[in-house]
């Protein structure tokens, strides 16, 4: 085996082993996944980089960015979103990420086209359109539009994951209690 081949083999093997160790460490350290503000870097890096300064919280025009409570362990004091309280409204200039002085939040070059805050799920058993009532509030409220959430010919919501940024506006707008829509955190 050539020396450069051996180096490549060891680099690749070591890289794979380090990624696995990082993933297992993250599973032990991060017990609850929070829905992070736009531009959040992967969770372990986010927890390390975030100084809990609150700059992102202060600049949010709709007060959607909240501070994790003390019971959040390592995540205490870090910014998160809870669409049940107030959804992110997909500000064009992403002020929360622009305000971050540490790089825990960054504005991606492609803006919102590169951001996925969460993954939207619909509970058809709860949604009133599946029980014969007209609604469509979720689709009309969506700041991204029908590239993320549309209505089919019968007036039922159709989720389009490829266009959804996971802001949670539809979750907040839903007329059912609890909401027929749920936002899941993404693995990071």
Image (spheres, rainbow, N blue to C red):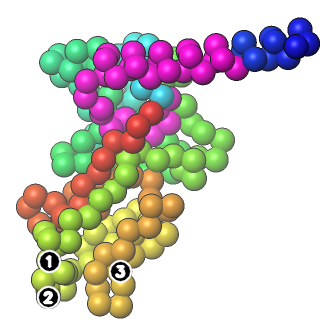
Report whether residue 65 is seen. no
Check disc 2 and report the residue beneath it: 132
Question: Which quadrant would the N terminus be assigned to in this image?
Answer: top right
Q: Which numbered disc, 1 or 3, marks the residue that appears first in the sequence?
A: 1
Identify the main secondary structure in magenta: helix
**Circle 3 residue:** 151
Pick the front one: 128 or 167: 128
Q: Is residue 128 above or below residue 117?
A: below
Badge 3: residue crowd in 10 Å (few <14, some 14–19, many ≥20): some
**Bounds of the magenta segment:** 12-41
Relative vertical location of residue 55 with respect to residue 123 in this rendering, above or below: above
Pointers 1 and 2 in contact (C-beta within 8 Å) = yes
- Residue in the picture at 24% in, 42% down: 82
**Left or right for 18, reference 56:** right
The residue positioned 25% from the left and 73% from the top of the image is 137
Residue 59 magenta-highlighted: no
**Residue 28 at x, y = what percent?**
31, 17
Q: Nearer the viewer, residue 170 or 21?
A: 21
Q: Quadrant of residue 47?
A: top left
Element under disc 2: loop
Of mark 3 and mark 2, the one earlier in the sequence is 2
Q: Position of residue 162 (x, y in %)?
A: 51, 61
Which image quarter: residue 18? top right
Label drawn at residue 144: none
Image quarter in which the C terminus is found: top left
Query: In the structure shown, which secondary structural element does the residue marked by tag 1 occupy?
Result: helix
Q: Give the residue displayed 8% in from the left and 61% down from the top.
A: 177
Q: Please give the residue where the numbered disc 1 appears in the rendered image.
A: 128
Q: Which residue is most to the right? A: 2
């Amino acid at each position: 085996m050539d020396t450069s081949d051996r180096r490549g083999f060891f680099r690749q093997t070591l890289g794979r082993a380090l990624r696995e160790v990082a993933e297992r460490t993250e599973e032990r350290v991060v017990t609850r996944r929070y829905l992070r503000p736009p531009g959040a870097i992967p969770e372990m890096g986010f927890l390390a980089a975030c100084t809990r300064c609150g700059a992102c919280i202060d600049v949010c025009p709709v007060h959607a960015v909240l501070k994790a409570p003390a019971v959040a362990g390592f995540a205490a004091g870090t910014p998160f979103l809870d669409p049940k309280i107030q959804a992110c409204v997909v500000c064009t200039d992403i002020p929360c990420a622009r305000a971050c002085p540490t790089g825990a939040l960054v504005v991606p070059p492609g803006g919102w086209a590169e951001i996925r805050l969460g993954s939207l799920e619909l509970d058809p058993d709860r949604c009133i359109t599946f029980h014969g009532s007209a609604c469509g509030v979720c689709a009309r409220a969506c700041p991204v539009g029908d590239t993320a959430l549309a209505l089919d010919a019968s007036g039922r919501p159709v989720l389009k994951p490829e266009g959804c940024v996971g802001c949670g506006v539809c979750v907040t707008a839903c007329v059912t209690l609890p909401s027929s829509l749920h936002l899941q955190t993404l693995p990071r």
